[in-house]
Image (cartoon, helix red, strand yellow):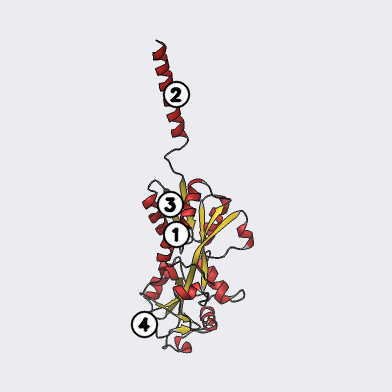
Amino acid sequence: MKNTKKIVIVAIIIVIVAGIALLSGVGSSENIDIVGSTSVQPVAEKLVETYKQTHPDANINVQGGGSSVGIKSAQDGSADIGTSSKELKEDEKQGLTEYNIGQDGIVIAVNNENTVNDLSKDQLKDIFSGKITNWNQVGGQDGEINIITREEGSGTLDAFENIVMGKDTKIRSDAVVQSSTEAVKQSVKQDSNAIGFVSFAHMSNDVKALSIGGVSPSTDTIADGSYELQRPFLFLVKGTPSGDLKEFIDWVNSSEGQKVLNEEKIIKSTN
């Protein structure tokens, strides 16, 4: 009888221990939401896709919305990782941990039929501000220049304005506004007189990249800083990451994560 009681007690203890293990989340994973820059979004999606090959239970969701949305989402905790393709202002940094996953070039894209191959930064500024309005003013064929830009809140727009336009010069008010790098590329592809700016990470041969001041955008020129039009890709976390979130970020910074970033043309600075 005593032995029977002992067996029952042991069985109950086993059930309790198993229940505690289940309740404590053993074998489960946290939800991780990544929100922000539409330029960073495809890179983040590729990182997550590769990460899940060795972490099949990982539950990570990636969304766009723009860098401003990414910064705000990280600040208010509605996203675990906010993404930004622009440097943060001092008041935006409060309470956030920044992870610079690499540099991305801002490519000046024109239609493949355009005969112009190079512009100076001053010419570029004058084109986007409206001082230069025809391609023949910069050595091209006769044709009115059509400006394609990005929406407010875009990290690509913010970086372009800071690097090219400066504080006191605005982009032409009649510029066509697009909401993503891909949309800008499509506009330029369909218009022989168009010019826009797009992410180097997502550049393709359906549009032509201009050199700026004689320097073409490339992995090497972005890495050494000789190509001036570039900006960081940032992961932003409120406070200090822990658990599954820390594990994912550590993986992004590992050799495996860096391999993915290299394949996606996100470049580590060498200067």
Tag 3 and tag 4, C-beta contact below 8 Å? no
Q: Rounded to the nearest whole Å, what is the CA distance between mark 4 and mark 1? A: 40 Å
Spot occupied by residue 187 in the image (x, y as percentages of width and height): 40, 73
Determine which residue is flagged by label 1. Answer: 255
Q: Rounded to the nearest whole Å, what is the CA distance between mark 3 and mark 1? A: 22 Å
- Disc sitting over residue 13 in the figure: 2
Residue type (three-letter) at the residue carrying disc 1: Ser
Nearer to us: label 3 or label 4: 3
Q: Earlier in the sequence, mark 2 or mark 4?
A: 2
Q: Residues within 10 Å of mark 1 (few under 14, many from 20)?
A: few
Q: Nearer the viewer, residue 230 or 169?
A: 230
Q: Earlier in the sequence, mark 2 or mark 3?
A: 2
Q: Rounded to the nearest whole Å, what is the CA distance between mark 2 and mark 1? A: 44 Å
Q: Earlier in the sequence, mark 2 or mark 1?
A: 2
Spot occupied by residue 201 in the image (x, y as percentages of width and height): 43, 68
Determine which residue is flagged by label 4. Answer: 113
Q: Residues within 10 Å of mark 3 (few under 14, many from 20)?
A: some
Q: Rounded to the nearest whole Å, what is the CA distance between mark 3 and mark 4? A: 39 Å
Numbered disc 1: secondary structure? helix
Nearer to us: label 4 or label 1: 1
- Disc sitting over residue 61 in the figure: 3
